[in-house]
Amino acid sequence: MIGHRTRTQTLLLSVIVIALNGLGNLSLTWGLRHAPDPLGLHPLRYLRAMIDPFVAIGIALLILWLLTRMALMSWADLTFVLPVTSIGYVLSAVLGCVFLQEVVSIERWAGTFLIFIGAMLVGVTTHHRTGRAPEEPK
Amino acid sequence: MIWLLLGIMVIATVFGDLLQSHEMKRSGAQSVNARGLLALLKQIGNRLYLILAIVCMAISFFAFMALLQRAPMSFAVPASAATVILETILAKLFLHERVGKRRWAGAVLVAAGVVLLAH
């Protein structure tokens, strides 16, 4: 039996989801930037790109992200999960700037800051879930 | 091409998230240890809406891969937050979630942030 999820547990799982997304995207982008051909609409090029270790690690992290995010959706409302995990967008901007030497303009930083404030606002809402959740079967 | 890919990604993500949230609410609170995640994987194969959600997420993912090759990650990832407002409205309508003032305000701020990122 899982029992009632506390606010701390929900926020902790949100942090894990955010970290997996940021690291997965970074690894994926790094690998794709070094792919020999543009992907376009050629399925074989997608498969070839997946052989790259960074792309493969990125995909593995994003599969883990998908599963943990699904678990988070079983704990909390979609309208809670979406804005809170939006902090991942801030993380992506920072990682892109630091590791991929992407140029982030003042407008983008301002946008990133707004996303962060929006996510924080939702993160402090008192309820995470509409109605009472049924428990996982034993 | 960038905006087309972003559009495909946003529409596929909205449908994928709504279907996922609907199914995960029905299944109850899931454990996040290794056994729990494996059980979650098994559930995907047994539930039509979860299968459809994964198909939507796969479409979104391939559009995202193509987008990453054409646009900076610091644009591609935050721009996908355009789904937030749309999903908040649809979650209220179809998932009957209680969306208070703070959640609306948060969703609007996130959307405003996305608009700034798009510049």
Image: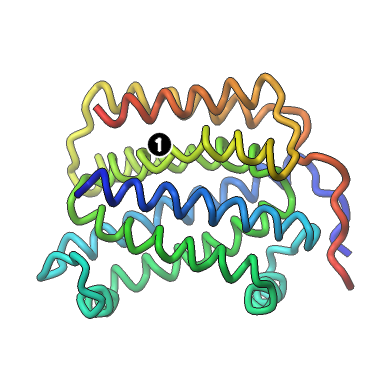
Say which element carries label 1.
helix
Residue at 89%, 73% (x, y): give it: A138
Establish if B21 lies above or below A80. Answer: below
Amino acid under disc 1? Val
- The quadrant in which residue B87 appears is top right
Q: Chain of mark 1?
A: A
Q: Residue furthest left?
A: A36
Left or right, A129 with respect to A28, comes to: right
Reply above or below: A52 against B66. Answer: below
Q: Position of residue B17 (x, y in %)?
A: 57, 52
Q: In the drawing, does residue A91 fall left or right of residue B48?
A: left
Residue shown at the point (79%, 59%) measured from the top left: B26
In this rendering, the answer to whether B44 lies above or below B60 is below
In the image, B100 versus B18, the foreground residue is B18
- At horizontal 71% and vertical 44% (from top left) the residue drawn is B95
Residue pushed farthest front?
B93
Percent from the top left, x then y, of residue B13? Answer: 48, 52
Q: Is B60 placed left or right of B52 in the picture?
A: left
Instruction: Rate crowding at label 1 as few (under 14), some (14 to 19) or many (20 or more) other CA atoms within 10 Å.
Output: many
Task: Estimate the x, y position of residue A110 in percent, counting from the top left.
Answer: 34, 21
Compare residues B47 and A103 and report the one nearer the observer.
B47
Query: In percent of the image, x 13 and y 65: which residue is there?
Result: A38
**Left or right: B27 in relation to A47:** right
Estimate the x, y position of residue B116 in percent, counting from the top left.
32, 24
Residue at which label 1 appears = A90
